[in-house]
Structure formats: structure tokens, C-alpha cells
Image (cartoon, rainbow, N blue to C red):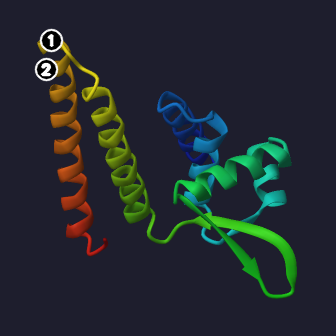
């Protein structure tokens, strides 16, 4: 790996950490983006200089988020990971799901509100999340998904 690839890996680690995810998840995402072919856990362990257990747990997390895909190769019992082919759509769909859940939860809180200031607070946040949801849905529709 060259200096610029390492820089990108570290920047993505920092970025994902700032988003509330483990730094290694960002580093792993960056490595998967840079690797032309799916990589084994052993290869990723060597590439990122972290434990296999850390790679494995973070790969599963990225898989849950739709960022990574687990791949099997005929004749090889190991799991391989690659960046999802449709990573943009999968991440957008996950964000849509999370925003819809947020709206459901806000409605529970809103139903308990008795004072105008509290009601207004819930309406402001609900309107914001609804706007974000609308933009996310348009982005997915524009990409031909959903």
C-alpha cells in the first residue's frame, strides 16, 4: 500500500469514528473500496494491521449497513468481503429505514406532549426528519432503486 492509500484509509477511519462508528469500520470500508477483488479476513488483517476478530466483527457491521458483502469462492471455505456493488442504494435505503423509525418514535413522544413549547419542539424535529426522508427517497428513486 502506498502513502496516499494509507492516508485515505486513515481518513475514512476518522470519518466513520466522527459518525459514531468504530474507527476500524471506516478503515475497513476504505480498504474494501481500494481492493479490486474481495479479500479474506486474513488478507484484511495483514493489510490493516489489526486483529482478525476486529476485522470480522467490523466486516459484519459493514455488511449489516449494506456497505460490505460477504462473498464465497468455490473450493475455499473462508469468507471474503468486498464493497457492495450497490453500496449507494443500500446505504440510502438503510437511512430511509432509520428515518421512518425515528418518525414512529417521535410520534410516541409527541403523543405525550401537553405544552405548546414541547409540541412545537416535536413538530420541528418531525418536519426536519420528514424533509430528510423526502430527499432520501428522491435520491433512491433517481438512482432507479426502491
Q: Residues within 10 Å of mark 2 (few under 14, many from 20)?
A: few
- Image-based side of 18 in relation to 141, left or right: right
Residues marked 1 and 2 touching at CB (< 8 Å): yes
| Residue with the mark numbered 2 | 120
Percent coordinates x, y for residue 40 in the rendering: 78, 65
Q: Residues within 10 Å of mark 1 (few under 14, many from 20)?
A: few
| Residue with the mark numbered 1 | 117
Percent coordinates x, y for residue 133 in the rendering: 24, 49
Percent coordinates x, y for residue 119 in the rendering: 17, 21
Work out which quarter of the rendered image holds the C terminus and state it: bottom left
- Image-based side of 25 in relation to 88, left or right: right
Q: Determine whether 43 is above or below 85 in the image.
A: above
Residue drawn at x 44%, y 69% as measured from the top left: 86
Q: Nearer the viewer, residue 70 or 117?
A: 117
Percent coordinates x, y for residue 51 in the rendering: 84, 43
The answer to whether residue 140 of the structure is visible from this angle is yes
Residue drawn at x 58%, y 51% as measured from the top left: 29
Amino acid at each position: 500500500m502506498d502513502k496516499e492509500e494509507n492516508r485515505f484509509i486513515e481518513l475514512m477511519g476518522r470519518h466513520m469514528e466522527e459518525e459514531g462508528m468504530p474507527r476500524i469500520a471506516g478503515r475497513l470500508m476504505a480498504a474494501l473500496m481500494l481492493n479490486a477483488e474481495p479479500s479474506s479476513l486474513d488478507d484484511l488483517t495483514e493489510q490493516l494491521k489489526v486483529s482478525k476478530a476486529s476485522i470480522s466483527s467490523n466486516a459484519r457491521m459493514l455488511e449489516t449497513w449494506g456497505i460490505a458483502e460477504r462473498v464465497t469462492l468455490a473450493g475455499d471455505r473462508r469468507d471474503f468481503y468486498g464493497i457492495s456493488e450497490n453500496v449507494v442504494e443500500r446505504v440510502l435505503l438503510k437511512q430511509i429505514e432509520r428515518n421512518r423509525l425515528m418518525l414512529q418514535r417521535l410520534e410516541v413522544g409527541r403523543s405525550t406532549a401537553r405544552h405548546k413549547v414541547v409540541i412545537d419542539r416535536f413538530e420541528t424535529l418531525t418536519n426536519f426528519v420528514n424533509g430528510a426522508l423526502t430527499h432520501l427517497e428522491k435520491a433512491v428513486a433517481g438512482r432507479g432503486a426502491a
